[in-house]
Image (cartoon, coloured by chain):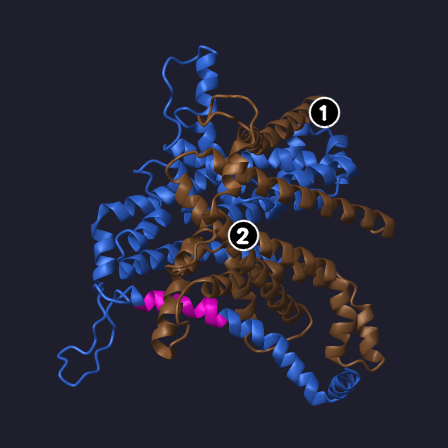
Chain colours: A brown, B blue
Amino acid sequence: MQKSSRLVFSALCFGFAFLYIPILVLIVFSFNQSAIASVWGGFSLRWYTALFNNQQIIDAALLSLKIAATSATFATILGTMAGLALTQMGRYSGRLVFTGIIAAPLVMPEVITGLSLLLMFVSLQELIGWPVSRGASTITIAHITFSMAYVAVIVQSRLSSMDQSLQEAAMDLGGRPAQVAFDITLPLIAPSMLSGWLLAFTLSLDDLVIASFTSGAGASTLPMVIFSKIKLGVTPDINALATLIIGSVSIGIVIASWIMFRHERRSGTA
Amino acid sequence: MNKAKQTIKKLYQQPLADKIWRNFVIGVPYFWLLLFFLAPFAIVLKISFATPIVALPPFTPLLDLSANADHWLLATWDNYRFLTEDNLYWISYFKSIKIAAISTFICLLIGYPMAYGIARATATTRNILLMLVILPFWTSFLLRVYAWMGLLGKNGIVNSLLFNLGLINAPLQMLYTDIAVYLGIVYTYIPFMILPLYATLEKMDTSLHDAAADLGAKPWQTFIDVTLPLSKPGIIAGSLLVFIPAIGEYVIPALLGGIDSLMIGRTLYDEFFVNRDWPLAAAVATLLLVIVVIPIMLFQRSQQE
């Protein structure tokens, strides 16, 4: 027994070292004075200064944030509706196809999703003249499509593990389905919708392949700019950018899970 | 405002409104997915039969309905014939499947004991460890792949460390090799393996282990005969979550792999962006879809159970 638990402990240590050492090295070297990746030349913030003076990166970051916020909001609305349609609406024709296509974007290789959406946009443009040009709007539509699947799965798992008696009681008391949804179901699943929104936001902020396919000549998102820079090798200002992104996301996640953990403990459901 | 509220309330009370609400909730996301997820596959299939031309868009229509056309049907098998005749595409398909399968197996080997350890930890430790698994999943995928470039490069951290320890005389070629691709895939996809494994291991009834131990089973026997079979759903879900996206992976082979690291996702991407041969890229995508469609259906079945 002792031997097996030591084995599990060393597996955990190895696994977490594997997950975290590359990120920690990246963060440490973003404060490196030297431009050579492996030589420590003393502490410096020069790469951060260089980053904030790089207009191309700032523009791309703003565009990415705009696309992420818009697509996450629409994905949350559509994904929540899909979650409701899969759990609360009983039987209807085409339900099987619906269940089939809702989870597929989760695992579909990105190159397929990207190429197929682009060819769809091109065909639509020929057929009905819309979308007039490709750019932020087509990237947003593409991001809504794949991240609504994530929201739907999160909302669906919450809804199917939830006690339905409140909704049933409300229906018995004469509440109409839409009223019950807005007054009871949605407030109950609000935390899941929030985590769905956050996940959709980060997925959109992170996507390179689908954005590259669906973007036009004008619009470059942050991952597209990063990718074109790092394809040629390590550049220290990208280390600084990575530290800022990873740092802010990590702080956000730690705070969010701490709040959720406390909330769970207080309400006694843990 | 109040008036609007009253109108909405009135609407609620009509059975017709219930019907509209129901159709709205089902119809809108359904229509969206049909239009932007399912229909695009039909278009990919259609364009995979077209001929590339230098124009906008760079492919021919499939039907020529003008009066003086000799052949009104312009669809062609040429793209598929080209794919089967050129060795390059066979190699990249098999290499993608091989790399995805081996990476999935490595993820399982590293992820299983980790998931097991997390599931057996005390409640507080478990929450912290779980958060540590999920945290990289939320941070940028692209930047986590990039982190390995700094580690593995010719002037990278690993090489300079080995050199300073006197273990090597010349830098090892690690970046731009297949090994770097394996490392990158295992590194970025391992949370997808750990989480479903954890979910099944955590639900497992530990009294079964006690019973097996009481009946004289050794720890490893208990593991092989009880724990492993019971965690099968987690193994299947986790493996598919790693295997399917890894097959079509583009970013990892493009950044960490060599010029010869032909994975199918990269071949498709280059066919599209470098050679600008849209019909051929569509044919590559169709064949890739054929490979992943069965694992995807297996994944959906495992989700519904």
Residue A216: x and y in percent read 39, 61
Q: Nearer the viewer, residue B87 or A265?
A: A265
- Residue B43 belongs to magenta span: yes
Please state the chain letter of the residue tagged with numbered disc 2 in the rendered image. Answer: A
- Residue B14 belongs to magenta span: no
- What is the magenta segment's predominant secondary structure? helix
Q: Please tell me whether residue A147 is drawn above or below residue B136 in the rendered image.
A: below
Q: Amino acid at mark 2?
A: Leu
The segment highlighted magenta reads B34-46
Residue at x 60% of width, y 77% of height: A92
Please state the chain letter of the residue tagged with numbered disc 1 in the rendered image. Answer: A
Q: Amino acid at mark 1?
A: Met
Same chain for labels 2 and 1? Say yes or no: yes
Q: Nearer the viewer, mark 2 or mark 1?
A: 2
Q: Say whether residue B291 is visible.
A: yes
Q: Which residue is mark 2?
A: A205
Q: Quadrant of residue A226?
A: top left
Q: Please tell me whether residue B15 is drawn above or below residue A230 in the rendered image.
A: below
